[in-house]
Amino acid sequence: MKNFYNVNGVSSTTPKGGGLSDLGGAVGGAIISQVIGGYFAKGEAEKGRALQEEIVKLSLAQQKLLEERLQDVQSETERQGMVFQFLAVQNNNEMLNRIQSKRYTSYIVLGVGALVFVKLAKRKNG
C-alpha cells in the first residue's frame, strides 16, 4: 500500500484530492463555463453588431455634417481670398496714387527750382 503525505507530514493510505472524481468535476466545470461563456459571447456579439451598425449610421451622419462644414469652410475661404485680392488691388492702387502724387510734387518742386535758378541766373547776367 502506498502512503500519501498531507501538508502536516502525516501519512495516510488515501490520497487527498485528485483522482477521477476531481477530473470529472474539472471537465464538467469547463464544459459548463464554455456553454455559459458561449451564450454570453453570442449576446455580446449581437450587441457588438448592433453597436457597430449604430456607429456606421452615426458615422455617415457625421460624414455628411463634416462634408457640409468643409464646403462652408471652402466657400468662406474663397470669399476671404476674394476680399484679400480686392484689398490687395486697392492697396496697390493707393500706393500708385501716392507715388504719382509724389511724382507730381517732385515735378512742381523741380520746376519751381529751375525757375528760381533761371531768375537768379538772369539777375547775375543782367
Image (cartoon, helix red, strand yellow):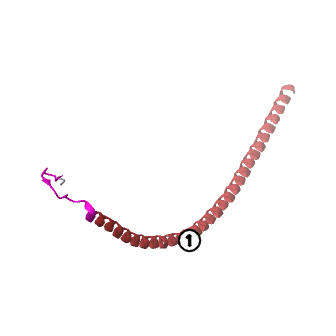
Above or below for 100 versus 85: above
Q: Which residue is located at x 34 percent, y 68 percent?
A: 33
Find out whether residue 105 is within the magenta segment. Answer: no
The residue lying toward the viewer, choosing from 112 and 21, is: 21
The residue lying toward the viewer, choosing from 51 and 72, is: 51
The residue lying toward the viewer, choosing from 54 and 108, is: 54
Q: For residue 21, what is the image quadrant?
A: bottom left
Tell me which segment is drawn in magenta: 3-22
Considering every residue shown, the one lying at the far right of the view is 126
Q: Which residue is located at x 16 percent, y 56 percent?
A: 13
Considering every residue shown, the one lying at the far top of the view is 125
**Viewed as shown, does residue 61 lie left or right of 90?**
left
Tell me the element at label 1.
Answer: helix
Q: Which residue is located at x 67 percent, y 59 percent?
A: 83
Count the marks: 1
> In which quadrant of the rendered image does the C terminus lie?
top right
User: Which residue has dot 1 on it?
Assistant: 61
Considering every residue shown, the one lying at the far front of the view is 1
Q: Position of residue 49 (x, y in %)?
A: 49, 71
Give the main secondary structure, helix, strand or loop, of the magenta stretch: loop
Find out whether residue 8 is within the magenta segment. Answer: yes
The residue lying toward the viewer, choosing from 80 and 122, is: 80
Q: Position of residue 102 (x, y in %)?
A: 74, 43
**Viewed as shown, does residue 64 lie left or right of 24?**
right
Q: Residues within 10 Å of mark 1 (few under 14, many from 20)?
A: few
**Viewed as shown, does residue 112 lie left or right of 60?**
right
> In which quadrant of the rendered image does the N terminus lie?
bottom left
Q: Amino acid at mark 1?
A: Ala
Q: Position of residue 82 (x, y in %)?
A: 69, 59
Q: Position of residue 40 (x, y in %)?
A: 39, 71
